[in-house]
Amino acid sequence: MKVGDYMGLSLNKVVKPQMNKLNKKAILFANKNSPTKRLYVEGEKPNLNKSDFLYLIKNLKKVYQIPHTLYRTMKLIEKDKPSSNSHMSKEKFDKLKKLLSTLGVDNYGYFEITPDKVFKNCGVPHKYALVISSSMDKAAFKTAPSIECQLEVAKVYHQTGDAANKVAEFLQKEGFGASPNHSMGGQLDYSMGAQWAGFAIVGRHSMAITKNNGACHRISIVYTDIVNLDKFITSDTHDMEWIREFCKKCGKCIRKCPSGAILQESITLDGVNPTCIDYKKCCEGFLHYGCGICIKECPFTSGDYEKIKSAYLKKSRNK
């Protein structure tokens, strides 16, 4: 049995058609400096007991919505076409902003894509990315690693994938070029995407840390040809830069990672892009209910962002 098969799907096979659709529509492709895309672990048996399977069967709806939203994603990619006017008005942005709120999007941002940001062997159909993020239930992550936690992840994968679809559909109807990229199977690193979009800093555990949700959220992207969203979306991470130094001194995720996948110092696996994650070891940990311990143990998930910031900066000033 493969990881993912206990949910009725092989994750790598499910997300590949989306990648192919986006590559077919792509106008911007990866270059020699691009990072290598990491696949979902395959070919190993997950550690599930009888009660886990019963819980899974009871909550199958949370899982089987994902293929449906992925299918919708591919249909919207097919429908995508360039706009005749790539400038958004304030009136249309207000409609978009209202839609994002209705869809339960907690954070969003925008950036211009360059080839080095796209995974190797991948391409994107537009030069700009609207990045959206929705929270996961922190209470579910208190049980990590567990089947309850894994199904919460699946539920929010669906939620953020569905949100990307509805945003892309809205933009297409308003006359803009837009293609969704489901929260599963991105053409670029979603954590880095949140950082480039200005609402998160990537921690040592490779997760995007936001002010309101810490590392406990999921991300999806809508590629678009709208050139002026930065006129309305002004978020940036300037006041979050202190998190980098905090992470270096904290190290809780390193100590708590059961598979030793989070490294003290970064390494360069692909010859270009540094990382603090040993992805082989991380995949081994994934067999235990998808793990999630790094999210659970991150101080920004369990604590209050402003209180952590205040205490850290005060301590730093007193040294």
Image: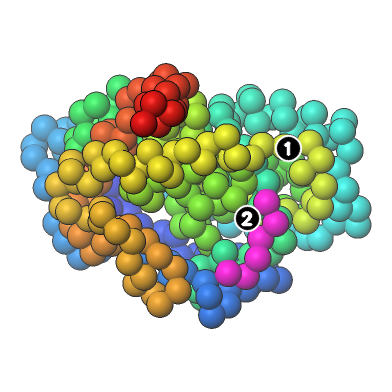
Q: Amino acid at mark 1?
A: Ile
Sequence-wise first label, 1 or 2: 2
Q: Is residue 123 left or right of residue 233?
A: left
Where residue 56 appears, x then y in whole percent? 23, 36
Q: Residue at (65%, 65%) from the top-left corner?
A: 114
Q: Residue furthest bottom?
A: 32
Front-most of 295 and 223? 295
Residue 111: horizontal and vertical position, in percent?
68, 51
Give the residue number, with chain letter if any, for mark 2: 75
Classed neighbour count for the residue bearing mark 2: other residues with Cα under 10 Å, few (<14), some (14–19), many (≥20): some
Is 24 or 273 nearer to us in this picture? Answer: 273
Element at label 1? loop
- SS for dot 2: helix
In the displayed orientation, state which residue is furthest to the front.
Answer: 319
Q: Are marks 1 and 2 in contact (CB under 8 Å)?
A: no
Q: Looking at this view, is 183 or 272 the one in front?
A: 272
Q: How many marks?
A: 2
Q: How is the image coloured?
A: rainbow
Along the horizontal axis of the image, is 36 left or right of 129?
A: left
Residue at the (82%, 47%) spot, across then down: 228
Residue for badge 1: 233
* Percent x, y of residue 223: 67, 54
Q: What label does residue 69 carry, if any?
A: none
Neighbour class for label 1 at 10 Å: few (<14), some, many (≥20)? some
> Is residue 159 visible in the rendered structure shown here?
no
